[in-house]
Image (spheres, helix red, strand yellow):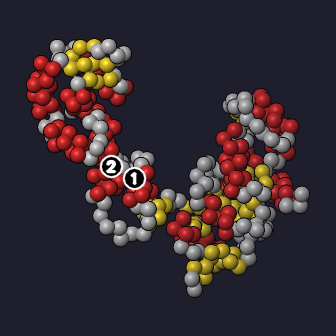
Amino acid sequence: MWSNEAHQLALLEFWASGTLKRRKSQAAAWEELAELPWSRRSARHRELALDEASRPALETMLDRVFPTWREVEAELRRRGLKVDLHGYRSLGEKRRVEALPEMRHRRLNQRTANAVLGVHSKATLSEEQREAIDEVEVTRDGLVRIRPNAGLSVIRNTAELDANALAECLGELVLTERALLDGTQLRGVLPKALLTVENLGTFVDIQVPPGWMVAFVPGWNTATARYLLELLSTTPVVHFGDLDHDGFGIMKHLRSLRPDLIWALPPFWQEQVAHRGQMKGWPADLDLGDAPEWVQRLASDGVWLEQEVLVLDQRLAVYLDGLLEE
């Protein structure tokens, strides 16, 4: 048990302050110390007090389970940090910032930055850690998968490539976040409309009206799609996703990026409710705004519909095209 960092710091805090509050992360250490003759319950709730006569025994235990405790305690005090688990973790942050090598990269992936400065690649960086790389652009390095419309070109500096030739060769057109940040642009014949879809099957199989572009925006992973929306700032955008509360939330998020976004709700989708509707509760307080009455009824009945059930319906392309005329 005493190999655990949180428990070692519980011992050190007990030695340094003479008291130890019971905390969830250190509960096992607290319970163990409560059973030893070194401690007694203080007047405060859930707090142990050290029997000063037993301090040498506690130091012996610290020497055994946390050999560097004296150096750690001295450094914490020198830096003005508390001698406890929180102070120790702040010390770790400061050490990692100080050990940061000279940044030759002007751009870093978010996970790389987290791993270098944080405790692991999925950690959340503190304000001090973020300031240490303030001049470095941190990227998520996502991508957006596209089925391009006819006549579209991709350009970067002086290079211009046929988007459809690329898609024919590679299976689809893929634009990465870094490419978009570095100036890759869309030229030639821009799409009549951009259709964003939530699920992969729909992305590869849906038939759209001539001149339309299709972009795969999986779930809440919209970070890179935002750059595509900026490139096509004057192009109508239609979103077609699952008809459930998550799909509604994703649509609302995309609409926050493009207020003019059109929510695709084919009325013939209702035909699927009896045989394809899935039971799934919608939040009672969800505000569906001006959604059609049949969508409101789905929500109140706790039913959701997958978008894939309409992919092969020949009426879908006609419906999509009609959205631009409304």
Quarter of the image for residue 72 reads top left
Quarter of the rendering occupied by the N terminus: top left
Q: Percent position (x, y) of residue 32?
A: 24, 19
User: Can you identify the residue that label 2 sits on?
Assistant: 93
User: Can you identify the residue that label 1 sits on?
Assistant: 128
Q: Percent position (x, y) of residue 316?
A: 81, 53
Quarter of the rendering occupied by the C terminus: bottom right
Identify the residue shown where x is 16% and y is 35%.
66
Identify the residue shown where x is 73% and y is 73%.
190
Quarter of the image for residue 40 reads top left
Question: Do labels 2 and 1 touch, CB within 8 Å?
Answer: yes
Residue 32 visible in the current orientation: no
- Of 237 and 94, nearer the camera is 94
**In front: label 2 or label 1:** 1
Q: Secondary structure beneath disc 2?
A: helix
Q: Is residue 165 above or below residue 300?
A: below
> How far apart, in angstroms, are the residues tagged by discs 2 and 1?
8 Å
Residue 216 visible in the current orientation: yes
